[in-house]
Amino acid sequence: MSYLDTLLDAAHPSPYSTVPHAAEQLGLPVSTLRRAVNCGLVPSYRPFGQRVRVCLPEVVAAIASSQSGGQSNGE
């Protein structure tokens, strides 16, 4: 079972977390995740003016999309 599947199973009813909790879950520095949120690289939510929340699967997807692959372009 992948990490993403683990996040979405019944044991984890809500994939939304505070920035510090999400950073801890993903093994990232809090400042790095907060910077990505502030720059708009990671979608964030502020329900009813409370703390900033992020959706863990969206953070994982943003990280995956930002990684550059080692694929050649055929040259």
Image (tube, rainbow, N blue to C red):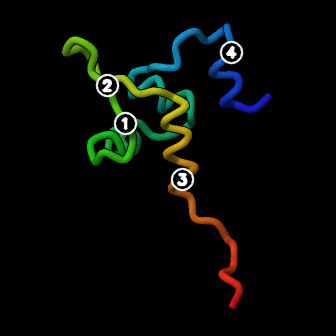
The residue at which mark 3 appears reads as 65
- Which x, y percent locates residue 71? 69, 73
Identified by mark 4, the residue type is Asp
Tell me the quadrant of the picture where the N terminus can be found.
Answer: top right
Tell me the quarter of the picture where residue 75 sits: bottom right
Mark 4 touching mark 1, by CB under 8 A?
no
Callout 1 amino acid: Pro
In the picture of the structure, the residue carrying the numbered disc 4 is 9
In the rendered image of this protein, does residue 57 appear above or below residue 70? Answer: above
Cα separation, mark 1 vs mark 3, equals 13 Å
| Distance from Cα at disc 1 to Cα at disc 2 | 7 Å
Labels 3 and 4: the sequence-earlier one: 4
What separation in Å lies between label 3 and label 2 (alpha carbons)? 20 Å
Q: Above or below — where is 37 with respect to 51?
A: below
The local crowd at label 4, few if under 14, some if 14 to 19, many if 20 or more residues have their Cα within 10 Å, is few
Q: Are marks 3 and 4 in contact (CB under 8 Å)?
A: no
> Residue farthest to the bottom?
75
- Disc 3 crowd rating (10 Å Cα; few below 14, some 14-19, many 20+) is few
Task: Give the spatial CA distance, label 3 vs label 4.
Answer: 23 Å
Q: Position of residue 59 (x, y in %)?
A: 49, 37
- Type of amino acid under label 2: Tyr
Mark with earlier residue (4, 2): 4
Residue in view at x 55 percent, y 39 percent: 60
- Residue drawn at 64 percent across, 20 percent down: 8
Circle 1 is placed at which residue position? Answer: 43
* Residue nearest the observer in this picture, 34 or 66: 66
Circle 4 SS class = loop
Q: CA distance from mark 4 to mark 2?
A: 22 Å
Spatial CA span between label 4 and label 1: 21 Å
Mark 4 vs mark 1: which is more N-terminal? 4
Residue in the picture at 50% in, 56% down: 66
